[in-house]
Amino acid sequence: MGIRVAVAGASGYAGGELLRLIAGHPHLDLGVATGFAQAGSKVGAVHPHVRSLRDVVLAPTEAGVLAESGADLVFLALPHGESAALAAQLPASVKVVDIGADFRLAAATDWTKYYPGEHAGTWTYGLPELPGQRERIAASSRVANTGCYAVSVVLALAPLIAAGVADPEDVVVVAASGTSGAGRSAKVHLLASEVMGSLSPYKVGAHQHVPEIKQATGATSLSMTPVLAPMPRGILATVTAKAKTTADPADVLRQAYAGEQFVQVLPEGQWPHTASTFGSNAAHLQATVDVDSGRIIVVSAIDNLVKGAAGQAVQNANLMLGLPEGAGLTADGIAP
């Protein structure tokens, strides 16, 4: 018998990815999976690809159901703003990883600027690759998973600002994401006929991951343009910043992530592709200096459902439970 875990919100894309990763994890066993409208349905009907858990019936998303499952850790894969109330009802002895945004931000003013409702508080930020964060996560019982765009940008930018190589007052991000980043609920702008063969910006000038990125990187001014791409998963972020020194940004990133199993700075001349990260917990990075403007350019690719959501959550859970950090995860993608 392994360590029992539960997944609240298992009917969504991130929840389904959590089920897939738990099913293949050498140390975790699923205690219960819950859904909202899909409660009462079998996993096989909601997520046909998770065959090993196909007969598991989704329970209602209630604190009592999660607490009675005997889970040592609960994953909350709920819409933004819905985790706090449920987490408050769980026993203090149960560890929690929240994939939503409820507990990521330290400043209540940042929350109210980008999200409805009141700020619920702040949990340990769940990005182990940041300096000192791995130890904080391991010592915590409540961890706030990073946002998907935030993972791709923070990994690209944080070491450069910390090293004094990139100007924190002049950061520009253009990042394209697959449609699964918008969740599984039916929306007109996500219909195949609307998405296929088209790129479209959204939440221009007011994306909710901006304060999170600034908080995690030390950037003081950041302009971000998200773009919806005609693919189901993946994020490709292009991050530019004014250079403060003549240091090679790729070398700075290599030094920062030396020994990291999931963050890979690619060889010179090789640039990230989203397809290379599909199905993996990897982040692929490459950097250069623009010969015309002199600005630093970093390109980052991740799978938004793995390193950007469920895989990152499992990585955090492994640390919280005293397991090998990479257990149940892979840096190898699926191609073609």
Image (cartoon, rainbow, N blue to C red):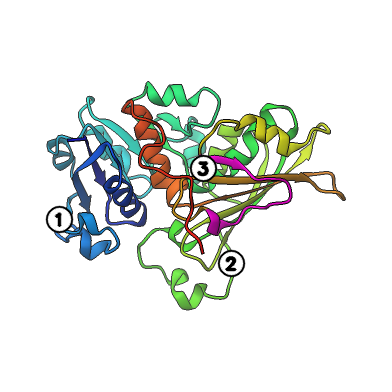
Answer left or right for 283 relative to 252. Answer: left
Give the position of the N terminus as an image quadrant. Answer: top left
Instruction: State the residue position of label 3.
Output: 113
Q: Are marks 2 and 3 in contact (CB under 8 Å)?
A: no
Q: Which residue is drawn at 35% across and 42% down?
A: 328
Q: What residue type is labelled 3?
A: Lys
Q: Which residue is drawn at 55% across and 50% down?
A: 207
Mark earlier in primary sequence (3, 1): 1
Q: Is residue 165 visible?
A: yes
Give SS at disc 1: loop
Residue 333: image tag? none
- The crowd level at tag 3 (other Cα within 10 Å; few <14, some 14-19, many 20+) is few
Counting from the top left corner in percent of width and height, residue 283 is at 55, 45
**In the rendered image of this protein, does residue 188 appear above or below residue 276?**
below
Q: What element carries label 3?
A: helix
Q: How packed is label 1: few (under 14 Cα within 10 Å), some, or many (20 or more)?
A: some
Residue stretch rendered in magenta on the structure:
262-276
Name the amino acid, label 2. Ser
Q: Are marks 3 and 1 in contact (CB under 8 Å)?
A: no
Q: Distance between the residues labelled 3 and 1?
A: 38 Å
Residue 272: image location, x then y, percent: 62, 53
Residue at which label 1 appears: 57
- Look at the image and say whether residue 19 sits in the magenta stretch: no
Residue at the disc numbered 2: 200
Q: Could you tell me how far apart the alpha carbons at marks 2 and 3 are, in whole angstroms?
A: 24 Å
Up/down of 320 relative to 112, above or below: above
Kind of residue at disc 1: Val
Q: Is mark 2 on a helix, strand or loop?
A: strand
Q: Distance between the residues labelled 1 and 2?
A: 37 Å
